Image (spheres, grey):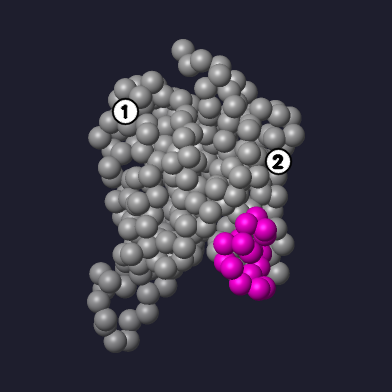
């Protein structure tokens, strides 16, 4: 039984936004924060999992390494297909929209999450910690929080895979006869109760997207961009509802116009124009997002202090 006076951590982020969340959580941990219960939506669930077992800095390091390697985690399925075909003149590789199971290649996601495949529930139990993951069961037609420590090792890893998968990114996991078709992404938290309704505590809430949502004047009409934008808007509105009804979280860390301007240290820095959508595959940008997350968390702590 977890005491009611411990801190909780909620991390919500898709794709490249997770680099910001990892930097922010690492900064909170470096400042002394410790968590016994965590909740996550999207790839942010992975950051939450590492943080609650005492490895917040490891999450930030992984995203720095992704930056150094050119962000292989976000390689598209089409790019993988082109590599397999080779540079054959006269061949054109096109996506089949009716059969394409996600825009991003599963190999990148699975390689990134591989270290947690061994025994995540065991590590949670060893740390006397709990982890909630937001998931959407498309076949059953429901969204829910799932306790990761109640699953076996493979089940917990499959849960992280499903949580990381989001519309316009990685396709839903599972499917077929008798197998749940599950999706995650930050949008999976919509309609769910705030995680602290389950385990009362003081909470830190880290969002990889601006909260509240900012205007994006440069947003185009491309379907991939629009779906990503929709996810962050829905999640931002959901978190706002949680905060209005709960009143217990001590602090929220999210990209904001003021912190971005201070971090960028240049006139005209505009969060709504320059902050990426989740599918951004830019190694230099990922490393920068980790550092911006650290800055935003430090600024949040100073303002609350």
Q: Residue at x 53, y 29 (%)?
A: 8
Q: Which of these two is toward me, 203 or 41?
A: 203
Residue 186 drawn above or below residue 2: below
Q: Position of residue 275 (x, y in %)?
A: 58, 63
Residue bearing mark 1: 123
Q: Which of these two is toward me, 69 or 98?
A: 69
Q: Position of residue 295 (x, y in %)?
A: 53, 54
In reply to whether residue 177 is colored magenta, the answer given is no
Residue bearing mark 2: 240
Q: In which quarter of the view is residue 107 placed?
A: bottom left
In reply to whether residue 268 is colored magenta, the answer given is yes
Q: Which of these two is toward me, 254 or 149?
A: 254
Q: Secondary structure at mark 2?
A: helix
- Farthest residue to the top: give it: 1
- Near mark 2 (Cα within 10 A), the count class, few <14, some 14-19 or many ≥20, is some
Q: Which mark is residue 65?
A: none
Q: Is residue 108 left or right of residue 252?
A: left
Residue 262 in view (yes/no): yes
Q: Which residues are the magenta region?
A: 256-272
Residue 1 drawn above or below residue 212: above
Q: Residue at x 28, y 38 (%)?
A: 117
């Amino acid at each position: 039984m977890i005491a009611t006076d411990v801190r909780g951590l909620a991390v919500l982020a898709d794709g490249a936004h997770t680099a910001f969340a990892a930097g922010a959580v690492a900064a909170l941990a470096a400042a002394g924060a410790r968590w016994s219960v965590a909740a996550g939506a999207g790839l942010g669930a992975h950051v939450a999992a590492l943080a609650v077992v005492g490895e917040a800095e490891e999450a930030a390091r992984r995203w720095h390494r992704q930056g150094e390697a050119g962000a292989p985690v976000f390689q598209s399925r089409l790019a993988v297909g082109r590599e397999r075909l080779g540079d054959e003149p006269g061949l054109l590789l096109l996506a089949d929209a009716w059969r394409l199971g996600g825009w991003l290649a599963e190999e990148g996601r699975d390689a990134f999450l591989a270290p947690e495949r061994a025994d995540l529930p065991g590590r949670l139990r060893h740390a006397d910690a709990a982890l909630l993951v937001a998931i959407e069961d498309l076949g059953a037609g429901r969204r829910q929080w799932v306790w990761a420590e109640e699953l076996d090792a493979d089940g917990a890893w499959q849960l992280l895979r499903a949580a990381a998968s989001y519309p316009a990114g990685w396709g839903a996991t599972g499917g077929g006869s008798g197998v749940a078709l599950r999706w995650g992404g930050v949008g999976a938290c919509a309609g769910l109760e705030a995680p602290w309704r389950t385990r009362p505590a003081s909470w830190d809430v880290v969002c990889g997207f601006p909260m509240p949502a900012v205007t994006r004047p440069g947003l185009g009409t491309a379907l991939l961009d629009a779906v990503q934008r929709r996810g962050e808007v829905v999640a931002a509105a959901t978190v706002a509802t949680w905060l209005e009804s709960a009143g217990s979280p001590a602090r929220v860390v999210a990209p904001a116009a003021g912190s971005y301007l201070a971090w960028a240290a240049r006139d005209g820095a505009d969060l709504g124009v320059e902050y990426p959508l989740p599918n951004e595959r830019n190694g230099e940008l990922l490393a920068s997002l980790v550092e911006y997350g650290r800055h935003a968390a430090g600024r949040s702590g100073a303002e609350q202090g």
